[in-house]
Each structure stands twice: as C-alpha cells, then as structure tokens.
Image: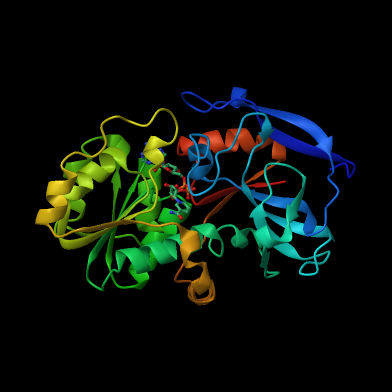
Amino acid sequence: MNASINRQVLLVEKPAGKLGSEHFRMTNGVVPEPKDGEALLRVRYISLDAANRAWMHGATYRSAVEANTVMAGGGIAEVIASKDPSLKPGDIVFGDTGWQDYAAVPARQLSKMPKLEPMTHLLSVFGVAGLTAYFGLLDIGKPKAGETVVVSAAAGSVGSIVGQIAKIKGCRVVGIAGGKDKCGWLTSELGFDAAVDYKDGAVFKALRAAAPDGIDVYFDNVGGDILEACLPQMNNYGRIACCGAVSQYDGAPSATGPRGVPGLIVVKRLIMQGFIVMDFYRRRDQALADLQAWVKSGKLKVEEDVIEGLENTPRALIGLLAGENRGKRMIKV
Ligand code: NAP
C-alpha cells in the first residue's frame, strides 16, 4: 500500500438487474485530513454483506448508496490520527469505512473494538453477524429446548451461527442452503440435524422430511419461495424471525412473494417479526460474553472466508450473492 494514495472502489452505476463488475471502478484518491471530531482510519478488513446490494435499491435502515461515490461498507480499521478525545492512534474500530484504504470518519459513528486475535472475528462471530444471529434467534425466535428451528442461508455468516446457537439451546436444527457440499458441511461439521438443498428443487417436500414434527422457529434470511415453503409447515404458536430477504436483493424484487400469509398467521397463531441488530446494541456485552464462551469451549465453530486485496471487493460481493461463500466473507485490504 502506498501511504500517500488512497485506493477507492466507486459504485459508478446502480444496477437495474444483477450486480456486475461493470458497476464498479477503482480509482486513486487522496488520503483525507480528519476534521475536528473525526479520526483518520487505515482500513484493515472490509465486511461483505448481502445487505450491501439491498442498499443500492434505496434508503432502508440507512441511507441509500449513490452512484459515483465510494461504495459503502462496514470495516475494521486502525486509527492512525485522531481529532476526537475518545480515540487515539493504534485503537481498533468498526464503522462504515467504505471500500477504500483510508477514511476520515466522525468518532461518534465508530465503535471501539477490543484488540483480539484473530482480528477477523471482530467482523464475524463477535461482529454484526454473530450479534444478528444471537439476538434474532434468542429474542425474536425465542427457541425452547426440544423445538425445531429452521434457518435459511444456513451456510452463510449469520445462518451458520444461528444453527449452532439453536443446537446449544437444545433444539433440533434444520438448515436450508444451496448445494450438496454446503448441506454436508452443516450436518458433518456444524452439528445440524438435517439440511435441505434448495437448489435441488422440491423444497417443501424435503423440508417436510427434514422437520417431520413441523417448525417452531423459522429464522428467515431469504424471503421469497423458501419463506412460502416454510409458512404452512409452522406449528401453532410458531415464531418467524425476519432477518433479511437475500432472494430479493440482486435484481428487481419479485412481484409474487409468499402467498397465503395472513390466513396462516391467524390460524396458526404465528408471530412474524422483523428486527435490525442495532436495536439490541445496548445488550451487546452480554451477547459477546456468551459468544466468547461458546467459541472458547468449542461449542461454536467460526467459519471465515477471507479474500485478499481491495481490488477484489466487487467480485467478492457478486460471488457472495451467488452463494460462493461459506461463513463470513470479508476482504483483507
Ligand atoms: P451470507 O449469509 O454470508 O451470504 C448470503 C447467502 O445467501 C449466500 O451465501 C447464498 O447461499 C444465499 N443466497 C443467495 N441468494 C439466495 C436465494 N435466491 N435464495 C436462497 N439463498 C440465497 O450473507 P449475510 O450478509 O450474512 O446475510 C444473511 C442475511 O442476514 C441477509 O438476508 C441479510 O440481509 C441479513 N442480515 C440482517 C441483519 C439485521 O439486522 N436484520 C444484519 C445482518 C445481516 P446459498 O449457497 O445457500 O444460496
């Protein structure tokens, strides 16, 4: 890395259909000067998130990403200069650094992180992915021992942690993922009781076989057809934790969506609730204590997919949306 050049990945056009490498361009910018209240950061790892694609559709829980700006994205970074008393050089922080080598970011938008090794865990199990799995499953899904928990995008960063926490809580766990390899990994390595390969077709039937007693908690990462297949198989008083809808992100959202939702919710007395992980941050310390203990004891395995080089960020996101990743995908800058 040349210390006077700030390599940046720009989103040059918002995609109308599928995201492609033509929507991005690399450029050399200048290393910014931090203003009062800001810190100058050297970005170490950039998080690749399915939501990066959803931000291109418009404002969500954050503002939309715009064309001809540095692509937004969360990252772990080292403070190299600070004009805010809360941060000093050498501190490690998490924040929206964007896809670039250096960023000047207001200190109040940064979270100071502990110095732990490997640092990558700050983006995976001890970062947004782990906290999303923890709060989404335990606070929204409220699983009880002996119940059946189903999770989609199960081999991804959030899903792989959800399934393992559900096992720790004594549940029967079924993962839904794309491809035989991922499904085999869920059952042989992560301890899931069964896995359904949705790319094999006939998801409804395969799910019935994998969850013969019905579903008590469905942790929904994907929406669309898979949500439609799960709904009729929910048990009375079941809970659906709506975490995301990755099947709808890359391209125009489907006009159909799950059918028969309101009737099923009434008859089965279901609770279906969306959540955003930030809403739970005041209880982050308790979650991190549990996650750290489970990782230390070997009950929770951490899977990371680290790709080297800022220049590979666009293809890494495109690949994540196509299901290339197992566990938490990130870029080592
Ligand atoms: P991820 O699960 O690591 O990767 C995305 C996975 O989605 C891919 O590996 C792919 O796996 C699967 N996928 C892609 N297209 C699909 C389709 N059409 N149908 C079914 N599966 C598909 O990514 P992530 O960033 O951790 O995101 C997972 C979910 O969590 C997303 O919905 C995201 O928006 C959500 N999330 C929510 C919050 C919150 O606060 N609510 C916070 C973080 C993340 P396959 O090979 O299995 O297809």
**Picture mark count:** 0
Residue 90 falls in image quadrant:
bottom right
Could one spot residue 190 in this view of the protein? no
Residue 53 pos. (x, y %): 51, 37
Residue at the farthest front position: 36
Residue 249 pos. (x, y %): 43, 36
Q: Is residue 129 left or right of residue 273?
A: right
Q: Is residue 32 above or below residue 148?
A: above
- Rendered residue at 44%/71% (across/down): 299
Image colouring: rainbow
Residue at the farthest right position: 4
- Rendered residue at 67%/67% (across/down): 113
Residue 145 pos. (x, y %): 26, 74
Residue nearer the viewer, 71 or 222 = 71
| Quarter of the picture holding the N terminus | top right
Residue 329 pos. (x, y %): 56, 47
